[in-house]
Image: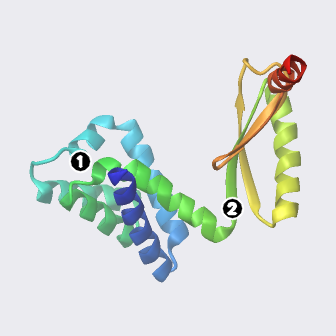
Amino acid sequence: MKDRILTDRYAKALFAAAQERSVGNVVSEDLKKINALFSEKKDLFAWFSARGGDKALRIAVISSVSKALSLDGISLNFLSLLIQKNRLGAFPQMGDRFNELMDYKEGVVRGTVTAADLETIQTIKDGLSAAISKKFGLKVVLSGVSSPDIVGGAILKIGDDLWDASIERKLTLIKESLCR
């Protein structure tokens, strides 16, 4: 809970600073670059995230990395602050939360469609994206996940909402109604 509160606080502060300077999309791309780097170079992320050590050296290194990746000044200042406050370990979650705030501001809803095969996923994604966009006036971005556990139908998850239209779920409902 405490980590979620801190993550939210830092992400909101970064979001406010980026919006104030009208560079939200630039900062979002910067966060993706840094996240990709840290995902690829786990030892580097561990070194930056470790408590103790020479913070000035870490800030100097992150400044060099920032120049190499052409990061915006706000992004560099944010990373430096996280190093100073020993909070860089929560950077991935902060980046995710920042992007959620950006999506909300831009009226974007993200979700996942899970189905048995890619063809079904693509068909469902296209139809659902258009229908949800039309009904609610939001831009819908759906990703697809193929699962061999699903015999037919699909499962849609957007935020905390889940719509299960899989054959397995329908069979379970029929079984429950017959057992009553």
User: On the image, which quarter does residue 143 sit in?
Assistant: top right
Circle 2 Cα neighbour tier, 10 Å, few/some/many (<14 / 14–19 / ≥20): some
The structure residue drawn at horizontal position 15% and vertical position 47%, both measured from the top left corner, is: 51
Q: Is residue 9 left or right of residue 82?
A: right
Q: Is residue 132 left or right of residue 6?
A: right
Circle 1 Cα neighbour tier, 10 Å, few/some/many (<14 / 14–19 / ≥20): many
Q: What residue type is disc 1 on?
A: Phe
From the viewer's perspective, is residue 98 above or below residue 124? below
Residue located beneath label 1 in the image: 48
Q: Is residue 50 left or right of residue 76?
A: left
Q: Position of residue 45 (x, y in %)?
A: 29, 43
The one of 64 and 145 positioned closer to us in this rendering: 145
**Marks 1 and 2: which is nearer the front?**
2
User: On the image, which quarter does residue 102 sit in?
Assistant: bottom right
The structure residue drawn at horizontal position 27% and vertical position 59%, both measured from the top left corner, is: 82
Query: Which label is found at residue 9?
Result: none
The one of 173 and 65 positioned closer to us in this rendering: 173
From the viewer's perspective, is residue 94 above or below residue 38? below
Q: What residue type is disc 2 on?
A: Val
Q: Position of residue 99 (x, y in %)?
A: 53, 59
Q: Position of residue 18 (x, y in %)?
A: 46, 74
From the viewer's perspective, is residue 121 above or below residue 69? above
From the viewer's perspective, is residue 86 above or below residue 107? above
Q: Secondary structure at mark 2?
A: strand
Q: Secondary structure at mark 1?
A: helix
Q: Position of residue 10 (x, y in %)?
A: 36, 64
Asked whether the viewer can see residue 34, the reply is no
**Total marks placed:** 2
> How far, Cα to Cα, is label 1 from label 2?
32 Å
The structure residue drawn at horizontal position 76% and vertical position 64%, both measured from the top left corner, is: 138
Residue located beneath label 2 in the image: 108
Asked whether the viewer can see residue 23, the reply is yes
